[in-house]
Image: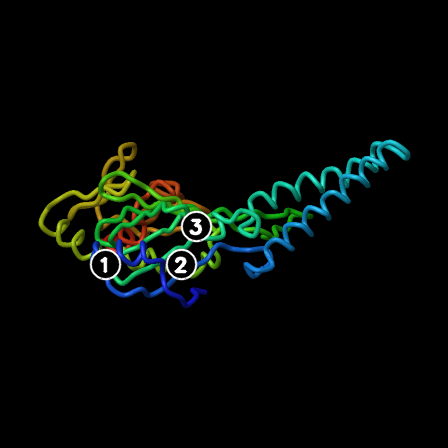
């Protein structure tokens, strides 16, 4: 969930210059442990002490018992070092990052004075969600889900925000819906006026949907366009397999595309 609080003066000034309106949501980096700033030094010291203990134990087991036993604490210590180096609790720059969602735009504070800002009506948004599963005796059990969103501004600058920001299940739909509200009507009007609008591998106009490989499918032949398993699938009436498939991360402004298309088929 988003957290209350005031943005930095630099963020507030940039948002004001861009006409972003009121601040609606702020998301912080995801932390494995919520450590207050005054206790950050203690957290780092305790973590390093624990890792040192694992390394020492692994070396002793390797030398005096067997390398097989010593390998496990050494492997755990290597993983712990990697996790610590990528922790917002350890790297202050990561901990200071913020994702701000305003009434009319998005602003990412990447720390060390690096800011990225784009209006909803100008943003190009690519998204990718990866779900890892454990397969045991034919049963798939999800155990980890990660997400990456790439926002591109009109001048070509981009920002990559990921599930390192807490609660991507909240900020992802907020971003997608804000872009759709700002852009879907304009795209819809362009299509109705006879223009062809491209969304990555798909192009839509008043007559149908097309891809470079499959050609054109009239809207009257489109049964549904759905999203699942990391793919966007265009399905044709009476056909068991998809007429066209594309990876979700290749379709910019996915919700805009789905919203406009849903008003053209069926």
Label ID, residue 171: 2
Residue 3 location in percent, x, y? 43, 66
Q: Quadrant of residue 174?
A: bottom left
- Give the residue displayed 56% in from the left and 61% down from the top: 36
Instruction: State the residue position of label 1.
Output: 16
- Camera-nearest residue between 5 and 226: 5
Closer to the observer: label 3 or label 2? 2
**Most distant residue in the left direction:** 193
Q: Within 10 Å of the Cα at label 3, are there few (<14), some (14-19), or many (20+) other Cα atoms? A: few
Residue 154 on image: x %, y %: 22, 43
Mark 2, Cα crowd under 10 Å, few <14 / some 14-19 / many 20+, is many
User: Quadrant location of the N terminus?
Assistant: bottom left
Say which element carries label 2: helix
Q: Is disc 3 in contact with disc 1, using a CB cutoff of under 8 Å?
A: no
Percent across and percent down for residue 28 are 46, 57
- Mark 3 or mark 1: which is in front? 1
Quarter of the rendering containing residue 173 = bottom left
Q: Nearer the viewer, residue 176 or 8?
A: 8
Distance CA(mark 3)–CA(mark 1): 39 Å
Secondary element at image label 3: strand
Q: Position of residue 163 (x, y in %)?
A: 48, 51
């Amino acid at each position: 969930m988003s957290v209350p609080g005031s943005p930095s003066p630099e963020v507030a000034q940039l948002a004001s210059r861009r006409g972003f309106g009121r601040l609606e949501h702020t998301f912080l980096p995801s932390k494995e442990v919520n450590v207050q700033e005054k206790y950050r030094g203690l957290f780092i010291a305790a973590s390093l002490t624990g890792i040192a203990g694992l390394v020492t134990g692994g070396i002793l087991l390797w030398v005096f018992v067997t390398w097989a036993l010593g390998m496990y604490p050494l492997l755990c210590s290597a993983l712990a070092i990697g996790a610590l180096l990528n922790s917002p609790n350890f790297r202050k720059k990561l901990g200071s990052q913020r994702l701000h969602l305003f009434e009319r735009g998005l602003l990412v504070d990447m720390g060390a004075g690096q800011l990225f800002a784009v209006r909803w009506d100008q943003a190009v948004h690519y998204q990718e969600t990866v779900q890892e599963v454990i397969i045991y005796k034919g049963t798939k059990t999800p155990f980890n889900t990660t997400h990456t969103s790439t926002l591109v501004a009109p001048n070509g600058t981009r920002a990559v925000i990921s599930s390192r920001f807490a609660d991507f299940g909240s900020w992802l739909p907020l971003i997608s819906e804000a872009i759709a509200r700002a852009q879907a009507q304009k795209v819809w009007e362009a299509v109705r006026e006879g223009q062809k609008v491209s969304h990555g591998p798909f192009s839509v106009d008043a007559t149908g949907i097309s891809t470079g490989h499959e050609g054109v499918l009239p809207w009257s032949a489109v049964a549904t366009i759905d999203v699942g398993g990391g793919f966007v699938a265009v399905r044709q009436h009476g056909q068991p397999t998809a007429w066209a498939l594309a990876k979700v991360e290749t379709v910019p402004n996915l919700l805009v595309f789905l919203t406009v298309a849903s008003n053209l088929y069926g």
